Image: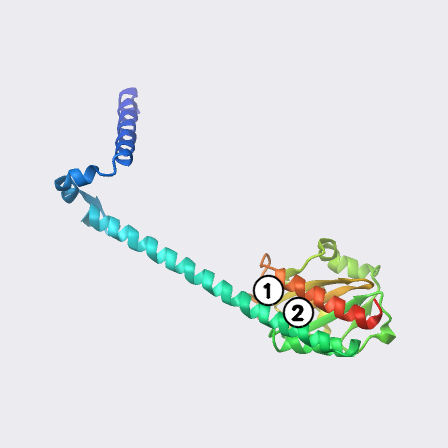
Amino acid sequence: MSSQRQSGLDEDAATEALVARYLSAHPDFFERHKALLAAMRLRHECGAAVSLIERQVQVLREQNQGLRRKLTELIEVARDNDRLHERLHRLALALMDAGGAEDVVATVREHMMGTFHADAVALVLFDADAAALPDGARAVARDDPELERRFGNFLGLGKPLCGRLTREQLEFLFAEAAGEVASAALVPLCAGRVQGILAIGSREPERFLQGMGTLFLGHMGELVAHALGGRLGG
């Protein structure tokens, strides 16, 4: 490109910037030049020329549609949160009414499979007295090398984790039901001497996605851990 042509391009860009600044500083310009406004034509995406006013209407319509979509998404998120809050509230009430550890475990499984629509549930407690645990809960030594190998990263986080688990992780948690789980949520349990994992599995690959919000799962873990702690002497 010659220096003369480059100079011309620079001048055009500078002129466009001046025009843009002028129009921004004088929003009433087209009110004072209505004929010019009516005569202006802009190229449409389909190739046809439209008036400036028509183009503005189209832009505003597209912006409005975008805002409506965002509003709909926000309303749906709010509704989902309301539903989750209601389910968590019902779980809390049921755990308060539970008599012993057996009732707590049964309540957790019932609500996970029913209210929260889980397809598989696992409750693993670290260093617990296996003889004192009811059906549906399993004791594992916290220093078990297999536990550390499979869940070391999760245990180091100390917060819920969602996504697709490895085959080894699924078999460790869900045993014969491992093949039915396409995605899962791992919820840490921590209340006094009660330490462990609540695992919730789903047949749907998109049910528990990596990076999804885990606030309600964290609250759920606290409720379950404290309920067990009160019945297991934690």
The amino acid at mark 1 is: Phe
Q: Position of residue 206 (x, y in %)?
A: 55, 65
Decide: is 201 above or below 58: below
Q: The disc labelled 2 sits on which kind of residue?
A: Ile
- SS type, badge 2: strand
Q: Position of residue 23 (x, y in %)?
A: 26, 35
Whole-percent x and y of residue 165?
Answer: 66, 63
> What is the quadrant of the N terminus in the image?
top left
Residue where numbered disc 2 is placed: 200
Task: Give the residue at mark 1.
Answer: 208
Q: Image point 42% across, 62% down: which residue?
A: 72
**Figure colour scheme:** rainbow
What's the residue at 79%, 75% (across, down)? 101
Q: Quadrant of residue 99?
A: bottom right
Q: Disc 1, disc 2: CB below 8 Å?
A: yes
Q: Nearer the viewer, residue 190 or 198?
A: 190
Q: Quadrant of residue 128?
A: bottom right
Foreground of the two, 24 or 206: 24
For label 1, the SS is loop
Q: Is residue 206 left or right of residue 230?
A: left
Q: In the visual, does 92 lie left or right of 79? A: right
Residue 130's x, y, as percent?
85, 72
